[in-house]
Image (cartoon, grey):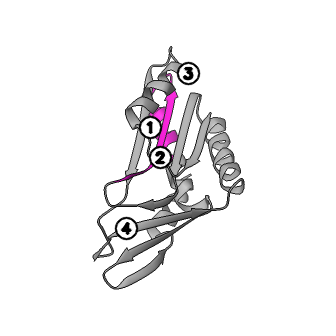
Amino acid sequence: MRIRVQAEPFDAGRELERLHEDAPGVGAVASFLGVVRDENDERSVGSMFLEHYPGMTERAIERIVRDARSRWPLSAVTVIHRIGALSPGDPIVLVAAASSHRGDAFQACEFIMDFLKTKAPFWKKESTPAGERWVGARGSDLDALGRW
């Protein structure tokens, strides 16, 4: 399990290579790469700033990953989430899971991402032409938890 919360950019391709190196015999590696949108709720987004609670955030992500590992046979998991100032198009989060079968890897990625969006202590502030605003979880994000 590799979990990082960081301000620095990451190389998604290299991170997937590292995940596969951690679990060389697997049959599937699935991933999700989230990027900062240039529009949200029909408002142009100029930039985003992410805050977190150091230590608490990493522990919350570890719990989410442990829960995923209890549901699916995962050989390796990587979660990287950025903090600080970000611009549209910047990678913000990478979730990747390695397993013997693609279905388990896909489901684990989706599960981890759904819980990251709603349960991990991150706070997002967008800068728009109308000013800055804090962005919370959407109703659809909360609804996604119901299927798990």
Above or below — where is 86 with respect to 30?
below
Tag 1–tag 2 contact (CB < 8 Å): yes
Would residue 36 appear left or right of 108 to someone viewing this image? left
Q: Position of residue 54 (x, y in %)?
A: 68, 56
Q: Name the residue beneath numbered marker 1.
A: 106
The quadrant of the picture occupied by the N terminus is: top right
Q: Earlier in the sequence, mark 1 or mark 4?
A: 4
**Residue matched to label 3:** 22
In the image, residue 39 lies at what x, y percent?
29, 69
Q: Of tags 1 and 3, which is closer to the observer?
A: 3
In space, the residues marked 1 and 2 are separated at their CA atoms by 6 Å
The magenta-colored residue range is 90-111
- Which of marks 3 and 4 precedes in the sequence? 3
Q: Amino acid at mark 3?
A: Asp
Which amino acid type corresponds to the residue marked 2 in the rendered image?
Glu
Q: Which residue is mark 2?
A: 110
- Report the label total: 4
Q: Quarter-wise, where is residue 130 in the image?
A: bottom left
Task: Where is residue 30? Give x, y as percent.
Answer: 42, 34
Question: Mark 1 or mark 4: which is in front?
Answer: 4
Q: Secondary structure at mark 1?
A: helix
User: 12 or 70: nearer the eye?
Assistant: 12
Distance in Å between CA atoms under marks 2 and 4: 26 Å
Q: Which residue is mark 4?
A: 47
